[in-house]
Image (cartoon, rainbow, N blue to C red):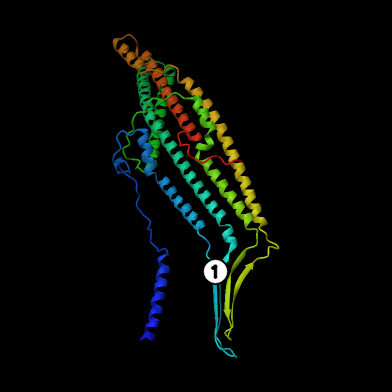
Amino acid sequence: MFAFAKPATRRLIALIVVLAGMGGCATYRPLPLTTKPTLAWRIDQLQGGSDARLPLDEATVLRLVMLNNPTLAASRAQRGVEQAQVLDASVLPNPSVQASLGFLVSGEGHASAWSAGFAQSLQALVTHGVRRDEARSSASSTDAKLLWEAWVTLSRARTLVIDVVDGERRLAVQERIALALESRAASLHAAVARGDEEAGTASAVFAAASDARSTHDDARRTLLAQRAELASLMNLDPSATLPLAALPASPRFDAERAQASIASMGEHRPDLAALRFGYAAQEARVRGAILSQFAPLSIGMDASRDSSRVLNIGPAVSFDLPLFDRQQGKIAVAEATRQQLHDEYTARIDSATAEAHALVTAVLINEHEATRVPADTQVVDAAGRALGRGDIDARTYSDLSVATLGQVANDITRDIYRREQRIAFDALTGAGLPNSLPPRIAP
């Protein structure tokens, strides 16, 4: 009975070992692609949109962009790849095992011969630390790149909010200009037909009316494209209703704070942090290349028995003789790449600093121009009342209205440009981002 139970016990033990090994293995799960668009048709269909208060202010728009932007969501998946590579680099190398069995076919032997052994690569253990450091630095570089991509996307969303909100204000003024000139042109056209006005005198008004309408139509098309782009940033259908709140007053530009932001730009800008992490990863590659120039060495233990049942056991060592290939090429490539990254980081931060200083100068000039007294549409309303009383004629009213409204449109354009410059400066220096990025890597 015991003889029958013994093979069964062996099979049970073998089954347990197999199942235990399978328990540590990954399993396949399909991930089918979707063939339908995921665009939302209403704001409340967006993630985080159900509790959004209408009209949307800038902060709410930025929150919806962060939660719903499809490009950022796809980019964030790259972080999982980098974390998986960190895990892969952190795993210790497996030892190798070899075994052979020689059946006795003829001769004076008494048993089958066998040999077995295992070995562990020491070079893989020596370079394990630098490979792990490289993977961690690469993952941190990816995180910084994702943060920079999100920062650029949010800066673009801020710019579009300004373009749309103030663009609608400017479009309404341009519509009034076009209507005023078209009314004047219609009156002149009738006067020319009656012979009361020369056609050459009226041609300038006709051309101005046509140009004003063309300017209005171009601005309307640009505004529609900007609305569609803003909607796409939050994964909203371009035809969906997107009400935006009026912009608050722009605060005074603080030149001293701007200079401080430029000085600390290396700690704020995520793309510069990504370059530093990339440089750290390349430093690890250089160290790994230097460590790998030593002879690959494996140590282990071998055991064998011949057909006469003589048993042998002892240590085993194997290594390559570095007579020709001592990793010279690999080390040279790694060091040259490190120098390239070093120079690229220096050039990037120098270029960004120069660009930021130039932008500060432009912002200060625009801020000074904004101190001039803006045009007021109440002048047009007062002129309309004067026209109704007969104090001024239609031509004077038209000229005054067009000139005043044109100045109002210019003031709005200057305000748009001034706000866009502020956003460009924040985007360039990383102003507003937390000062939690790692310190600069010393060149």
Q: Amino acid at mark 1?
A: Ser
Residue in front for this viewpoint, 391 or 370? 370
- Confirm whether residue 231 shows in the render: no
State the residue at coordinates (56%, 87%). Answer: 104
How crowded pointer 1 is (Cα within 10 Å; few <14, some 14-19, many 20+) is rated as: few
- Residue 281, position in %: x, y? 56, 49
Query: In the rendered view of the protein, which quadrant contains the N terminus?
Result: bottom left
The quadrant holding residue 111 is: bottom right
- Residue 416, position in %: x, y? 43, 28
Which residue sits furthest right? Answer: 323
100 sits to left or right of 164: right
To which residue does mark 1 refer? 96
Query: In the rendered view of the protein, which quadrant contains the C terminus?
Result: top right
Which residue sits furthest top? Answer: 391
Q: Is residue 296 above or below residue 246?
A: below
- Residue 170, position in %: x, y? 38, 26
- Residue 165, position in %: x, y? 37, 30
Helix, strand or loop under label 1: strand
State the residue at coordinates (62%, 58%). Answer: 292
- Confirm whether residue 58 shows in the render: yes
Q: Is residue 66 above or below residue 366?
A: below
State the residue at coordinates (58%, 57%). Answer: 127
The quadrant holding residue 198 is: top left
